Amino acid sequence: MYSFKIFAKTNITPSFNLIYLGISMDVLEPKAMQDFIYWKMEHDIPTLDEDFDVIGSEVSKLDVLEVYQKQASIAGSAEDHKAKDILRLVLLEVISKSRYGIKKKLELIELVYSTFEYPPEMNSFIYYMPSETGANSPEELMDNFHSFLAKEHNRLKI
């Protein structure tokens, strides 16, 4: 699980939907919601009444999901889909910017691929998937990966 700090490694602004979804998918640790609340306060972003139920105490995934269930249902499924794509992009950006070698990065990318239920748009840089572009080497897969990141930034307008 990642902490809230992953957002500092990208140019992607955190949002309630991203944090809630990340916690519900076991991608972000529950403490990420507390860190998000503090981040909102530092940036003069209004807080929710529910925020005070999770600040100052250790929270579990269940605590966070219960406290924010109503807020999450208001956000709606269209926002959830976009939030899921943005959260995936955040994780992939962190991998891209890491100091790991190509093979380790490809392994981590595969974990994101499985976490997000094998999205077909990622097939071109998953080492065990047949590539439409004919990419076979790790370097070619990484080229496809970087192309995907650029396309996702444009598509998501980030």
Image: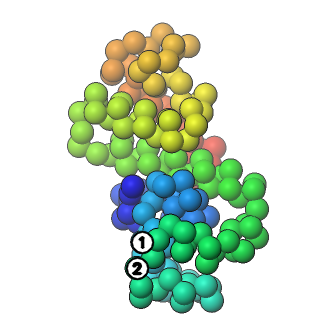
Q: Amino acid at mark 1?
A: Lys
Label 1 – label 2 distance at C-alpha: 8 Å
Place of residue 149 in the rendered image (x, y in percent of width and height, measured from the top left): 49, 39
The answer to whether one can see residue 133 in this image is no
Q: Which residue is mark 1?
A: 31
Element marked by disc 1: helix
Residue carrying label 2 = 58
Q: Is residue 76 above or below residue 125?
A: below
Q: Residue at x 63, y 43 (%)?
A: 155
The amino acid type of the residue labelled 2 equals Glu
Tell how many labels: 2
Front position among marks 1 and 2: 2
Residue found at x 53% / y 24%: 123
Determine whether, in the image, residue 111 is placed left or right of residue 82: left
Residue at 40% x, 79% y is 58
For marks 1 and 2, the one nearer the N-term is 1
Tell me where residue 49 appears, x and y as whole percent.
63, 89
Q: Are marks 1 and 2 in contact (CB under 8 Å)?
A: yes
Q: Under tag 2, what secondary structure? A: loop
